[in-house]
Image (tube, rainbow, N blue to C red):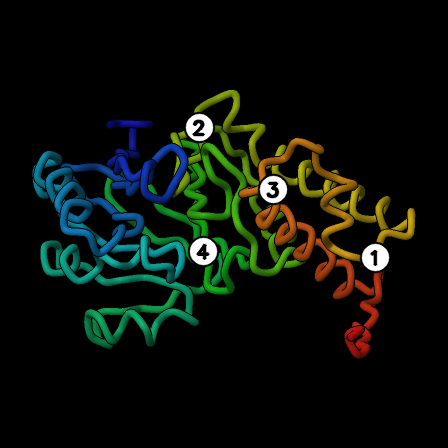
Amino acid sequence: MQVTPHVYAEHIDDEAVRHPGGSNNYFVGDPAEGMIIVDTGEQDRKWTGQILSAYEGLGRPSITAIVITHGHQDHIGGLDRVFEAVHAPVRCHPKLVKRLADIVGEENVVKLRAGERIPTGGGVSLLAIFTPGHENDHVCYYLARDRVMFTGDTVLGASSSTVHDLADYMKSLEKLARHRVEVICSAHGPVVPMPRGARLIAWYINHRNEREQQVLAALGKGIGDVDGMVRDIYPRNLKKGLRQAAAGNVRTHLHKLVKEGVVEEVPATYRLKAE
């Protein structure tokens, strides 16, 4: 599917297995002059087969680079097969170089620099934006010509993202918000076009800030345990299966607040169980 003049999306229907709204890989540039592939999907042969079929459908364009958003398996699992088909240099965060070099060879992996522009066909380039938070090796890519942000797992099209370090994550969202974004091309969920694409990053920031205020309010009420905060913040009818995710979300906010010196963590105490 062509998304913008220089972006083609290949949608993978894995919604029932892992990701709300399915997953996406992208070809960026001009099929007649050269293109970049964004991520290589899961190791599943059907998944990589779809990527390579899309490559064939575009006329087997010259691939100037394979760029990776981060090192989770559903983003690098198909790297060996895709690399064998297109023989393009692999570009990634410096923290991911060694791992990918073990897959395709050290000579084929080139580390990115923050703010580097990666050229492709059609007179366009991708700007590499280091965006830790979801993972510490995460990179988003901005196509200024089409005002498209490739957000990997930092911003998703149909759900919120899991976060490893919320303090870093919020700074990364602020980085993305500085660019004139109209279309969000995320790794999972639908492509988000104008006008929603232009508003989605701001929504992510506001949503996290609102949740942080709720955590602070719970602490202000004297609620000091995660389960108590979940009961205070989330709806009473929250499904049991979602409570664990909610608790994890609260913990990420607490870790951020501790890191920033706003909250202190009081060690747990122990006592003998009653006979």
Disc nearer the start of the sequence (1/2): 2
Looking at the picture, how far across and down is residue 94, in whole percent?
42, 70
Mark 4 and mark 2: Cα distance apart in space: 19 Å
Mark 1 and mark 2: Cα distance apart in space: 38 Å
Say which residue appears at 41% left-offset and 40% top-offset: 186
Q: Which residue is mark 2?
A: 192
Q: Is residue 236 left or right of residue 181?
A: right
Judged from the image, the secondary structure of the residue bearing numbered disc 4 is strand
Say which residue appears at 54% left-offset and 28% top-offset: 198
Question: Do residues under tags 4 and 2 come within 8 Å of each other at their CB atoms?
Answer: no
Q: Which residue is mark 3?
A: 178
Judged from the image, the secondary structure of the residue bearing numbered disc 2 is loop
In the rendered view of the protein, which quadrant contains the N terminus? top left
Judge the density around disc 3: few (<14), some (14-19), many (≥20) Cα neighbours within 10 Å: few
Q: Which residue is mark 4?
A: 139
Q: Nearer the viewer, residue 123 or 101?
A: 101
